[in-house]
Amino acid sequence: MSKPFQFKQFIVNQDQCAMKIGTDGVLLGAWTSLEDHPFSILDIGAGTGILALILAQRSQAEVIEALEIDDKAYEQCVDNFEQSSWNDRLFCYHASLQEFAEEIEDDYDLIICNPPFYAENYKTENTQRDLARFQDAMPFEHLLESVSTLLNKNGLFSLIIPFSEEQRFINLATTFNLFPKRITHVKGSPSTDIKRSLIELSFTKTHPKFSELIIETARHQYTDEYINLTKDFYLKM
């Protein structure tokens, strides 16, 4: 039984979700740019709803919608939304991304996604967890094709992926006229390899801004950059 995760301004129940709250989701929610003051936001593959909740706390967006295909995760996401103080702005759809992209007439100012990873060929006995973690459930091609339909022409698409997938993803994105605007490489500590890439894309071709984020200098000794990014959310920051 997973305990509810208590953040400063909201609680996330996660016992029905294969993918539990992790650093990736909080990092992406905190890192995503809101400088264009988006009116409408879409979270693809919402899981617990953590990304939408963080963006509800950070923004004045009137429409914050989430999409979740897994039955149990969908129910949990709806529940987490309802229990939050922003429940009037949060809504979750129960559908696949392709169905959703075909049916929805609207477009969004900001789309966020913490997509399933581990294209590597290992699978566990837990189908629900595999669905959450594996690209079979949401290959990059499907994701980018749908985003190119759902994102408005001045919108931003923000996601986190393994660093090992960065170049392939960016090459693929350009085939859908989506280009990197900002890239942050995430390292666990100064001496470890780059683990994740935070990437922001738009339909405008530009020279992307690169930066690096190191999470900790020693066990539980967090860097100032990481603390500044996440302190509005984590209780102990």
Image (cartoon, helix red, strand yellow):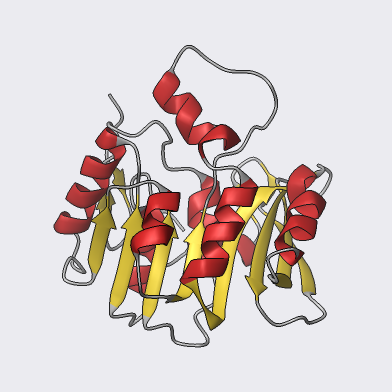
Q: Residue placed farthest to the front in the image?
A: 102
Residue visible at 28% across and 31% down in the picture: 15
Residue visible at 47% across and 64% down in the picture: 231
Quadrant (top left, top right, bottom left, bottom right) of the N terminus? top left
Residue 44, image x and y in percent? 44, 55
Residue 203, quarter of picture: bottom right
Judge from the rendering whether residue 233 lies leftward or rightward of residue 24; answer left or right: left
Residue visible at 74% across and 56% down in the picture: 172
Residue 187, image x and y in percent? 74, 49
Residue 87, quarter of picture: bottom left
Residue 204, image x and y in percent? 70, 82
Judge from the rendering whether residue 88 lies leftward or rightward of residue 118; answer left or right: left
Residue 162, image x and y in percent? 70, 45
Judge from the rendering whether residue 211 lies leftward or rightward of residue 229; answer left or right: right
Judge from the rendering whether residue 6 lies leftward or rightward of residue 222; answer left or right: left
Note whether residue 229 is visible: no
Q: Nearer the viewer, residue 144 or 6?
A: 144
